[in-house]
């Protein structure tokens, strides 16, 4: 996930800011909006926060990551949840989008909450810059798979059985408190407290999302196949 310090190093930032401003124009008084995760959503949150402040709008956000939730609070956008509200519409980015509107999302490890927002929303807007279009899913990115810690090794083997050419853990760097100059690689932990596997496939059939979800221990996958979306680019 992206934080304040990384915001100035966003790739394709100018394109993404144009998309962010376009999405912010859509915001209306009283709406409940699902806020996505990742760099494009980060910039869109900033743009919406600016509009809310300038026009005195009252909206609520249902964020899909801790980073975006904290940013909403900084911008004084009230935060709610799917337990209490249903989004009028959602916005989010994507890592890859093919010609049929199928997507790989979740390189920011928030696909579980992103998919929850999407299936609960009346309308879903996916903001993509020119780098996100692909001829086939899996060209540039693996499929991220969120799995429960105790099931992680079992899930890894079952994903291989489904034909993945490579499956590996997602790692993160952590500083050792007693040795601030030393960093170690540890398994990435999602906002939900789970592990992430990255799976590369030469081909991604339309059934793969469902096949992966049937593995015991899989919380969610970064495959979004056949979801009703409006692509904004």
Image (cartoon, rainbow, N blue to C red):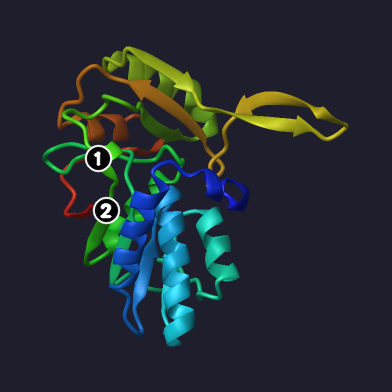
Q: Secondary structure at mark 1?
A: strand
Residue at image point 40% right, 61% down? 44
Most distant residue in the left direction: 100
Is residue 196 or residue 215 the one in the foreground? 196
Q: Nearer the viewer, mark 1 or mark 2?
A: 2
Query: Eyeballing the image, is 43 above or below 62?
Result: above
Does residue 88 appear left or right of residue 150 in this picture? left
Q: How many marks?
A: 2
Q: Within 10 Å of the Cα at label 2, are there few (<14), some (14-19), or many (20+) other Cα atoms?
A: many
Most distant residue in the front direction: 14
Residue at image point 20% right, 25% down? 204
Residue at image point 34% right, 28% down? 141
Q: Secondary structure at mark 2?
A: strand
* Residue picked out by circle 1: 103
Is residue 179 or residue 135 the one in the foreground? 135
Image position, residue 211 (x, y; %) = 24, 29
Q: Within 10 Å of the Cα at label 1, are there few (<14), some (14-19), or many (20+) other Cα atoms?
A: many
Image position, residue 200 (x, y; %) = 33, 20
Residue 83 numbered tag: none
Is residue 127 or residue 137 the one in the foreground? 127
Q: Earlier in the sequence, mark 1 or mark 2?
A: 1
The image quadrant that residue 56 belongs to is bottom left
Residue at image point 26% right, 14% down? 163
Image position, residue 81 (x, y; %) = 45, 67
Residue 126 numbered tag: 2
Label 1 with label 2: CB-CB less than 8 Å: yes
Query: Eyeballing the image, is 213 above or below 191?
Result: above
Query: Eyeballing the image, is 14 above or below 35?
Result: above
Image position, residue 175 (x, y; %) = 75, 32
């Amino acid at each position: 996930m992206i934080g304040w310090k990384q915001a100035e190093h966003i790739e394709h930032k100018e394109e993404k800011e144009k998309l962010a401003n376009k999405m912010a124009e859509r915001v209306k008084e009283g709406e409940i909006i699902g806020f996505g995760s990742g760099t494009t959503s980060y910039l869109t949150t900033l743009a919406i926060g600016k509009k809310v402040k300038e026009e005195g709008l009252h909206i609520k956000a249902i964020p899909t990551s801790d980073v975006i939730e904290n940013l909403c609070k900084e911008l004084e956008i009230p935060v709610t949840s799917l337990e209490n509200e249903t989004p009028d519409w959602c916005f989010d980015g994507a890592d890859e989008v093919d010609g049929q509107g199928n997507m790989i999302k979740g390189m920011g490890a928030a696909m579980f909450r992103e998919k929850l927002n999407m299936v609960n929303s009346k309308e879903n807007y996916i903001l993509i810059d020119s780098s996100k279009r692909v001829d086939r899913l899996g060209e540039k990115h693996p499929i991220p798979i969120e799995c429960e810690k105790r099931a992680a090794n079992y899930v890894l083997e079952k994903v291989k059985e489904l034909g993945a050419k490579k499956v590996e853990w997602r790692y993160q760097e952590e500083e050792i408190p007693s040795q601030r100059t030393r960093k170690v690689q540890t398994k990435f932990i999602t906002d939900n407290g789970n592990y992430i596997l990255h799976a590369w496939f030469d081909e991604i059939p339309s059934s793969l999302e469902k096949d992966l979800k049937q593995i015991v221990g899989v919380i969610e996958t970064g495959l979004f196949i056949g979801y009703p979306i409006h692509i904004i680019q």
